[in-house]
Image: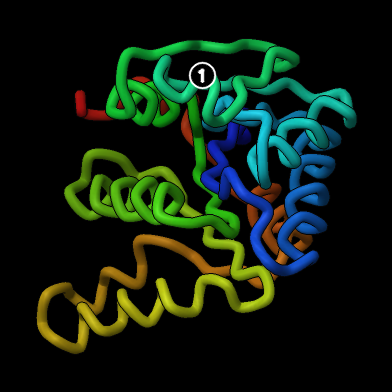
Amino acid sequence: MQISSVAVFCGSRFGSRPEYAAQSRALGTALGRAGLRLVYGGGHVGLMGTVADAVLAAGGAVTGVIPAFLHSREIMHEGVTDLTVTDSMHDRKARMFAQSDAFVVMPGGLGTFDETIEIMTWRQLRQHDKPIYIVNVAGWADPLLAMVDSCIADGFASPSARNLFEVVPDVATLMTALAALPVQADARDRVTTL
């Protein structure tokens, strides 16, 4: 069974480079055309809104998960296929995790870093074995990757930490990797409770 859903972590702002929005639109369009459901934070602003709108425009399905307190701050996207409002950020992340077969990290800020580090940590702790892809648009993720390398160099992480995720340069490379990725039929059911 091929994967059917992808969680995307990305900014609720647009960032300072036009490539960020362009690649976010490309990702949404590609996911929609490939028939892969987008699972994301439920907002209608910044790059997250750009990805969701592009999936919908391409005829794809979108599941949004947003905590109640961010309802107005991230301007909840009322046009998605499914929208869940949670009580907390923790519940949001757990629901996104449970509904996703793979994770894609696009440009973003502290919230994106939080989600990325957490999902990598869960994989390191063997709470899941779902693939994680970092799309290094215009080198935005270089500091994040340098931090991981620094942790390894300083003895706080094993060199195997670099195997927790794969870095790709753009959406086209990501989609090639996703298309070749088989996932077991029971992938969503074989995860330890978080």
The image shows residue 183, relative to residue 39, as above or below, that is below
Do we see residue 85 in this rendering? yes
Residue 14 location in percent, x, y? 68, 53
The image shows residue 91, relative to residue 130, as above or below, that is above
Coloring basis for residues: rainbow
Pick the residue in front: 30 or 81: 81
Seen at 44% across and 27% down, the residue is: 96
Q: Quadrant of the N terminus?
A: top right
Q: Quadrant of residue 182?
A: top right
Most distant residue in the left direction: 155
Seen at 29% across and 48% down, the residue is: 118
Seen at 31% across and 82% down, the residue is: 149
Q: Quadrant of residue 36?
A: top right
Q: Quadrant of the C terminus?
A: top left
Q: What residue is pinned by disc 1?
A: 71
The image shows residue 160, relative to residue 132, as above or below, that is below
Pick the residue in front: 159 or 113: 113
Residue 48 location in percent, x, y? 64, 40
Do we see residue 186 in this rendering? no
- Side of 171 where 39 appears, left or right: left
Seen at 56% across and 48% down, the residue is: 10
Residue 192 location in percent, x, y? 21, 28
Residue 29 location in percent, x, y? 84, 41
Most distant residue in the front direction: 72
Most distant residue in the bottom direction: 153
Pick the residue in front: 10 or 46: 46
- Side of 40 where 156 appears, left or right: left
- The amino acid type of the residue labelled 1 equals His
Local packing at callout 1 (Cα closer than 10 Å; few below 14, some 14-19, many 20+) is some
